[in-house]
Amino acid sequence: MKRRDRLLVWAAATDATFEPAALAGETVLVGKCIHCGRKLVVGFDGRARGRPATLEHLLPRAAGGADRLDNLAVACATCNHHKGVRTDDHWGSDPRARARVDAALARRMRRWRDPPQSWALPRLPRDAFPSKHALLGEHP
Ligand SMILES: [Zn+2]
């Protein structure tokens, strides 16, 4: 299983809006886009079902954002792409970009949940463990 797929499952599993549901004979996670709140479905195989769900770096990697769960969230492909254009290309020249990112990071932490151990989650890459500061709601 690819790192990106594993991280997408974990981003959903650690987001309290995502709950298990039965879909065509399999268990999937159904929850909400970090930005627009529209319904998204992620399988335990790390693949989206239905509308494209993508793994988003809330603070863009180009701006120093970590490839770590507290900086990762599930977002619609359209929300992710739109935000990427706004912040990646204009980072530093758009004072609202950082405010948007901070709001999304705070929303991610409000939605944080430690996933039940009974869930069949893939192995989380060691370097993707969230920082203690992030889990305490402290952002740099
Ligand atoms: Zn969205």
Image (cartoon, rainbow, N blue to C red):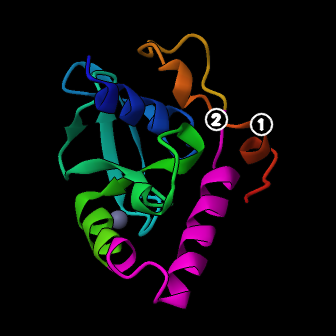
x, y (%) of residue 135? 75, 42
Residue denoted by label 2: 130
Instruction: Using the image, tell me which numbered label, if any, was put on residue 58.
Output: none
Amino acid type indicated by mark 2: Pro
x, y (%) of residue 75? 36, 56
Q: Provide the residue span drawn in magenta.
A: 86-113
x, y (%) of residue 138? 79, 55
Q: Is residue 44 left or right of residue 134?
A: left
User: In the image, is residue 70 above or below residue 58?
Assistant: above
Asked whether residue 106 is drawn in magenta, I would say yes
Residue denoted by label 1: 132
Seen at 27% across and 21% down, the residue is 45
Ligand 1: does it lie within 8 Å of the C-beta at label 1?
Answer: no
Q: Are marks 1 and 2 in contact (CB under 8 Å)?
A: yes
Seen at 77% across and 36% down, the residue is 132
Separation of disc 1 and disc 2 at Cα? 6 Å
Seen at 53% across and 30% down, the residue is 128
